Amino acid sequence: MLRPFLLLALRRPRLWPAMLSAGWAFRPRGWYRKPPFLPLPSREYMRWRLETAYGDPDAVPPRDELVRFITWSAEMRRRMKPDTAAPLWTKVLALAALVAFTVWANVRAADFEAVRETVAGAGYTGLFLASVVSGFNLVAPIPVALFYPLLMESGFAPFATLVTIAAGMTGGDFLGYLVGNATRDLAGHRLGRVRVRLERLLGAVRSRHRMLPYGLLFLYAALAPIPNELVVIPLAFLRYSLPGVMITVLCGNVIFNSLVASGVTWVLGWWA
């Protein structure tokens, strides 16, 4: 039932946002209460839509009609949706507040003995858990390494701090891998032949460029200031090696946190 849409997604990646929007709009009520726990349109609903459109519940829509429907429905939802996007000035204020809080935490908060004692009392265990939350957080992913100067003032060792933060972020990435793997298992029976074809295509890519995905993942984890889960979850869904993915993101996380810690320290030193 979903095969035409999946084939279209593979051939035209630019339609992914519109297709995801359509899938979410057509999700059944209570989808999270029954397997496969995914917001996918029900089979009965899809058959009804096909029967009303083509007179046959088993009809296969032509590709060009699918494209027109997906783009048209996405445009209609966009026009009917109230404009609730945050204005630019609120985003600028939020960024300024984050910068101000980071400066305050590293400069002013370090002057208070109670703050330093609280941070020191959490120890490396607390630092690790905070890094896990930071690593597996798509809503407000604030790197713990931003507070590196405060951690130094609280008695943490530089090398152990960076290693702990990187390990914690990798723990968050591991949770993301589990999500991607579980999603694959739950949705496996719905993907059918398309999944098999995709795996064959990926097998051909791996045979020619075996290390390319891991190299790109390393650069992403080391340089991109956005959650690694955006890449880790799809790789897990496509059955990329767990040890390979975790080792790659760990190395990338070490470099990323080292760069963040060095940058924050330099900026605060220049500020002072």
Image: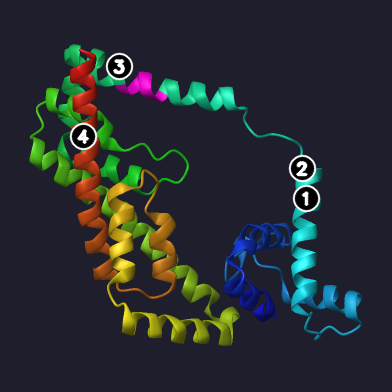
Residue at which label 3 appears: 104
Viewer-proximal residue, 72 or 233? 72
Q: Does the magenta-highlighted stretch encompass residue 253?
A: no
Label 2 Cα crowd, 10 Å radius (few <14 / some 14-19 / many 20+)? few
Residue 60 horizontal side relative to residue 217, left or right: right
Callout 2 secondary element? loop
Callout 1 secondary element? helix
Q: In which quarter of the image is the C terminus?
A: top left
Closer to the N terminus: mark 3 or mark 1?
Answer: 1
Residue 32, image x and y in percent?
60, 61
Residue at which label 4 appears: 261
Label 2 close to label 4 by CB (< 8 Å) = no
Inspect the image, locate mark 2, and give the three-letter code of the amino acid beneath it. Lys
Residue 238 horizontal side relative to residue 147, left or right: right
Residue at which label 2 appears: 81
> Magenta part of the protein: which range?
98-102
The Cα atoms of the two marked residues, 1 and 4, are separated by 43 Å
Q: In the current view of this chain or complex, which residue is farthest to the front?
A: 208
Closer to the N terminus: mark 3 or mark 4?
Answer: 3
Residue 68 horizontal side relative to residue 229, left or right: right
The Cα atoms of the two marked residues, 2 and 1, are separated by 6 Å
Residue beneath the point at 43% across and 74% down: 238
The Cα atoms of the two marked residues, 2 and 3, are separated by 39 Å
Residue beneath the point at 20% across and 56% down: 251
Callout 3 secondary element? helix
Label 1 Cα crowd, 10 Å radius (few <14 / some 14-19 / many 20+)? some
Label 2 close to label 1 by CB (< 8 Å) = yes
Residue 181 in sight: no
The Cα atoms of the two marked residues, 3 and 1, are separated by 43 Å
The Cα atoms of the two marked residues, 2 and 4, are separated by 41 Å
Inspect the image, locate mark 4, and give the three-letter code of the amino acid beneath it. Ala
Inspect the image, locate mark 1, and give the three-letter code of the amino acid beneath it. Arg
